[in-house]
Image (spheres, grey):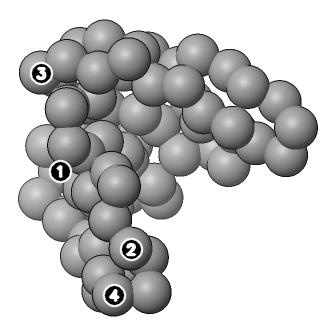
Amino acid sequence: MVSDGGGTALVVSGKELSRVQPGQDLPDGARLLEVRSDRIVISDQGCRRTLMLFADPKAAPAPECDTSGENAD
């Protein structure tokens, strides 16, 4: 389930499926900041990262860390 900035992310961790909304923690401890139709934005150890959905992880570089402080932990 996706929308522009709000909405809910469906997260699979192992065999468990959970719903995570912006502001809540993900199973790995990162915080979900935004849910968009093509990406999510997380905050992980002070880094703001944008993760593209449906992208081939082998072809995509690791997301850059934005430490500008906006919405970071």
Whether residue 37 is situated above or below residue 63 in the rendered picture: above
Q: Can you see residue 4? A: yes
Q: Which residue is mark 2?
A: 56
Using the image as rendered, state which of residue 66 and residue 57 is in the foreground: 57
Q: Earlier in the sequence, mark 3 or mark 1?
A: 3
What label sits on residue 4 in the rendered view?
A: 3
Distance from the alpha carbon under mark 4 to that under mark 3: 25 Å
Would you say 5 lies left or right of 29 here? Answer: left
Q: Which residue is mark 1?
A: 69
Q: Quadrant of the C terminus?
A: top left
**Which residue appears at 73% of the width and 25% of the height?**
17
* Element assignment for label 2: loop
Q: Earlier in the sequence, mark 1 or mark 2?
A: 2
Distance from the alpha carbon under mark 1 to that under mark 2: 28 Å
Whether residue 35 is situated above or below residue 68 in the rendered picture: above
What label sits on residue 18 in the rendered view?
A: none
Please, what is the three-letter code of the amino acid marked with disc 4? Ala
Distance from the alpha carbon under mark 3 to that under mark 1: 21 Å
**Which residue appears at 45% of the width and 54% of the height?**
44
* Element assignment for label 4: loop
Q: Nearer the viewer, mark 3 or mark 2?
A: 2
Q: Nearer the viewer, mark 3 or mark 1?
A: 3
**Which residue appears at 68% of the width and 49% of the height?**
28
Distance from the alpha carbon under mark 3 to that under mark 2: 22 Å
Would you say 54 lies left or right of 18 here? Answer: left
Evaluate if marks 4 and 2 touch, with contact meaning CB atoms under 8 Å apart: yes
Q: Which residue is mark 4?
A: 59
Please, what is the three-letter code of the amino acid marked with disc 3? Asp
Q: x, y (%) of residue 1?
A: 38, 17
* Element assignment for label 1: loop
Q: Can you see residue 48? A: no
